[in-house]
Amino acid sequence: MTEPLLKVDDLRVAFSTARGEFEAVKGVSFEVLPGETLAIVGESGSGKSTIAASLNRLLASNGRISGGSVRFDGAEITTMAERDLNSLRGAQIGLVPQDPMSNLNPMHRIGDQILEVLRAHGAGGENKRQRVVELLEMVGIPDAEQRIDQYPHEFSGGMRQRVLIAMGLACQPRLLIADEPTSALDVTVQRRVLDRLDALTEELGASVILITHDLPLAVERADRVLVMYRGEVVEQGAAKQILEQPKHEYTKRLVEAAPSFMTTSLVQKPDGSAGGGGADPEPFARVTGLGKSYRIRGQA
């Protein structure tokens, strides 16, 4: 039997507030096997991002792990010395945070921010700048040799998110935590970014914890799904099982509320029947072969 890469047992997390102590995570347990993708799903405030922050002890200053165990490759993280944690973060456990504009420094060039990750862990070899270019190319950034010297505001939202993926995978971690990695992107860009993330983690053989409020996305991308509600795990299992045979009332509501799971067309034809058959209507406009080019700053 394959040993889990990550084993979380009865994890409890509390925050000190003006109204007293608030328990945000209440006895959560799960495992992540090598090469597996686990999605943690729940509405805002369910505790899913708090779990993500607990796995490498990056909780806010008023938060603390009040109970339970988090073991990564057999090592207990909850009692690990800060020096050892710093060696683990980024090198063994990568992180792709949400909201790239908050997690990229607007005053520093993109390349310098990725370079900082490599230097912190002595990775990237002698020619670290070339390694940064390779990382940008790896996540699908065009003209990486020129864009390495640009600032975050010169990148689109999808490109900034890809930069965070490059930073999270820079040291080839064994576990990648992706906390709502595409929540600020439109559906088309979201798919491209997630496709790239899937391909890269598969190539590295990395395990992934995907934090999301989007159940359809979780079912599509993960091997297993863990459903959170008010700080507790209400259901977990294979992605297909969660979709087709939800047991908890909250999970059933998530499935019912997910529009991409609906099989009946909501678009009606002129006769009042459901759409999906017959000839398509003529388009109001048709665009063919449209293109637009932009000059990259610094190029002649």
Image (cartoon, rainbow, N blue to C red):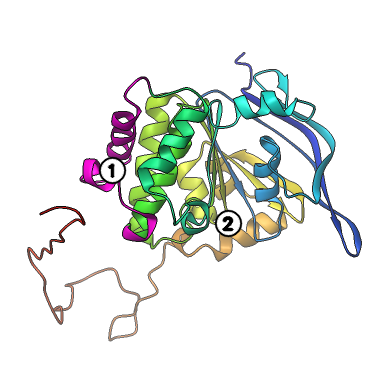
User: Which residue is pictured at 36% across the width and 42% down the height?
Assistant: 111
Alpha carbon distance from label 2 to label 1? 26 Å
Residue 107 is tagged as none
Q: Position of residue 141 (x, y in %)?
A: 28, 45
Residue segment shown in magenta: 125-154
Placement of 138 over or under 194, stated as above or below: above
Q: Where is residue 102 shown, x and y percent of the image?
A: 52, 57
Classify mark 2: residues with Cα within 10 Å, few (<14), some (14-19) or many (20+): many
Query: Relative to 104, does residue 69 appear above or below in the rendering?
Result: above
> Please, what is the dominant secondary structure of the magenta stretch?
helix
Residue 25 against residue 170 in the figure, above or below: below
Q: Nearer the viewer, residue 54 or 44?
A: 54
Q: How many marks?
A: 2
Residue hosting label 1:
140
Residue drawn at (10%, 66%), measured in percent from left and top? 290
Name the quadrant of the N terminus: top right
- For label 1, count other residues whose C-alpha is less than 10 Å away and answer few (under 14), some (14-19) or many (20+): some
Q: Which residue is mark 2?
A: 213
Position of the C terminus, as image quadrant, is bottom left
Image quadrant of residue 132?
top left
